[in-house]
Image: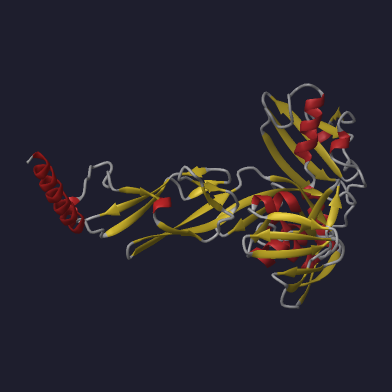
Amino acid sequence: MKRITVLLMFFMFSLVSVAYAQEREIKDIQLMPSKIEAKVGDKIDFDVALIYDEKNMMTSVDYPFLGNHIALSKTDYTITKPHLLNLLSNGMLKVTGVGSSKVTVKVGNIEKSVIISGSLDDAVDGGYIKNGVTLLPMKEVFKALGGSVTYVAQQDSFTIKVGTTLITLPKSGTKATLDGEPLTLKSPLLIQNGVTLFPASLLSDALDGILVYNANAKKMEISIDKGKMAVNIEPSQKQNSGTSVTSTKGKLYAVAATGDMMGWSILKGHPYEKSIRVYFKVSGSSVQIHTKDIRKVDLNKKVTWTDLDGKKHTNTIKQLYVVFGKLSNEYTSEILYKMFGKTYSDWIFASSVNAERYVDQYLEQKGLIESPGSNITLLPETEVY
């Protein structure tokens, strides 16, 4: 008798459960990532809220979907760019590269999507400008983009994979390929201090990246979809007469400035001393830096240049220097070099000298800071004559 009663109760419970499940038909879903704009390396909680008929929902004012959550891994989900987002075993998403990826979730007949973007917090070091072409460190940049770089000795070339995009770069020359199709590089690869660099324009050609050179900050700012990163830019080894940045340690010294700059110090011993005068002044925990282009330039000299529509114009160098300052945040250095040639290359040289780094090295050498930039507030200015 007792057994029959238990069986009857179980049978009734099953009927009630089936009826309740039928009543609790899902009306909608809501995707609830903990963030949609993250840094590379961040881990993101990702819940899926199931929305039932209102009469059967467990709700609260602060948490309207209480008790109706499922993990992303329990759904029919897709990630458009898995090289940028990786689902971990604990159910969290890890941001692995710069860019944007769409996460689409399907529950029953309901489908929703959300775009999650990753950006790189710290700028990558090692970029150069040579003959008006900006070059970026290959391994570091493509790693930040969630890609991989492999050197193929048999072909003497590099194979780069970013998601489904496949790029082949020759170690010498400009004949590359993009997904099997021919692609001509803006310049050959450059090997600088053991680091291989590639022309920045490849990012726009292959990955639809947007490149903006920030002359004041001496950075190439890169946008891939909604993801952002930056690369610090230094002149190439050829431009700085073969002297590397790190070789200045122990050779830097300072002398007192006179005239209008009395009260400031002039940094000596850096590799651009004959071209750029670096003034600095320490005040408490901050450092002011002022650079002056001391090269002999005839600012009244007239230069003829050709715009992107093929029309020729003539301006003085002084006028063009003003134009460069306004356009440097709107156009890439490659475009400006194409229009203005050596005039632009000469101008960009002054703005691409990282005076802050040399001042930091000098202050570290004197024991005023423990490491470059650790207790320094920089107020840079640049003066071109």
- Asked if residue 26 can be seen in this view, the reply is yes
From the viewer's perspective, is 127 left or right of 82?
right
Give the farthest residue toward the left: 1
Q: Quadrant of residue 332?
A: bottom right
The residue shown at (69%, 65%) is 166
The residue shown at (47%, 45%) is 92
> For this rendering, which residue is in front, 98 or 347?
98
- Asked if residue 385 can be seen in this view, the reply is no
Give the farthest residue toward the front: 1
Estimate the x, y position of residue 302 in percent, counting from the top left. 85, 66
> For this rendering, which residue is in front, 111 or 121?
111
The residue shown at (81%, 44%) is 292
From the viewer's perspective, is 121 left or right of 168?
left
Estimate the x, y position of residue 200 in percent, counting from the top left. 73, 59
Q: Indicate the colouring scheme.
A: secondary structure
Estimate the x, y position of residue 26 in percent, counting from the top left. 26, 58
> For this rendering, which residue is in front, 231 or 91?
91
Establish if 109 lies above or below 295.
below
Estimate the x, y position of residue 216 in percent, counting from the top left. 70, 48
The residue shown at (88%, 54%) is 297
Q: Quadrant of residue 356?
A: top right
Point out the image quarter for the N terminus.
Answer: top left
